[in-house]
Image (cartoon, helix red, strand yellow):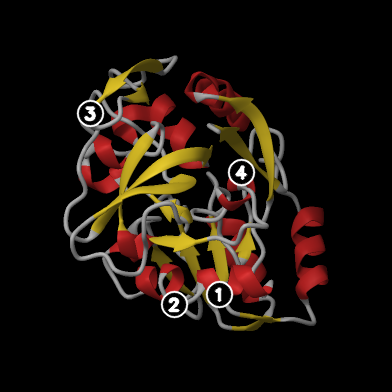
Amino acid sequence: MPPSNTAAWITAEKANPLELKPAPYVQPAANQIVIKNLAVALNLVDWSRQDLGASLFGWTKYPAIFGSDVSGTVEKVGSSVTRLKLGDRVVAHADETTNNDPSQGAFQNYVVVDSHMASRIPDSLSYESASVIPLYPSASISFVTTEASNRQDASRLEWCIGTLKDKTMAGGFAVGNGSPTPVIEIISKLNGTKFVASANPNIGSPPPDDIGFKFVFGTSLRENEVGPAIYENFLTKALADGTFLAKPDADVVGHGLSDIQKGLDILKKGVSAKKIVISLA
């Protein structure tokens, strides 16, 4: 008998709060694994989807199970999976967002993920700390705006430019609402690659001709070579030898699926230099 599964469901568009209800325990396909979730991290996109509904992701079907960032232990492996085994401690990027498959949403006890989107983590790294990794932008400028920090002004831009003026930039990454414009301005005045990627499709004014710009989605790497490059070839070793750190710090604000809504409400108010995490251990 498979274990019983429970999820924090969003039962209809813009439904609040999330509701704890049974969920199917889904067997993995050949290239997938099932993870017993022991921590989930929350992202801007999670509360935005709840608040904005179809105006953000019009393809979402309800009821749904949201969430992308998970850490836990491998519960089951598909027939083609050889890199991971039962009991492995892992961090993974779940992908309900694009495929409307509730079994692949993070906010439940057992989640199905593609094996090339999961990495083993060292024993020294807690599940809560590991869970911050998947959707957090790294090695880039992240100008994340919140209600409290949404008043961009010259002094904030000047501080960013001054802090980074001696660095060679790989580009910029804009995340929050209204963030593409200031990130483009910052990158235009720094050394390095003149390119900005944005997780927000609302760019505002077109960028200057000398600044490259592309809208990217957090789950794009599942379908291209980036996912395996990160999760299969890089992350496990980098975490073990300390060349990659699980940052920002995890701020554990609750325990159990019932506290996910509490975490979303905290995140919506705005946080800085940390990531909201719910422990499921």
Quadrant of residue 184 in the image? bottom right
Residue that carries the numbered disc 4 in the rendered image: 128
- Camera-nearest residue between 220 and 213: 220
Residue that carries the numbered disc 3 in the rendered image: 24
Residue 221 placement (x, y as % from top left): 35, 65
| SS type, badge 2 | loop
Whether label 4 touches label 2, CB < 8 Å: no
Q: Is residue 22 left or right of residue 270?
A: left
Q: Is 192 rendered above or below residue 28?
A: below
Residue that carries the numbered disc 2 in the rendered image: 233
Whether label 1 touches label 4, CB < 8 Å: no
Residue that carries the numbered disc 1 in the rendered image: 237
Quarter of the rendering occupied by the C terminus:
top right
| SS type, badge 3 | loop
- Quick one: label 4 or label 3, which is nearer the N terminus? 3
* Amino acid type, residue under disc 2 in the picture: Asn
Q: Is residue 59 visible?
A: no
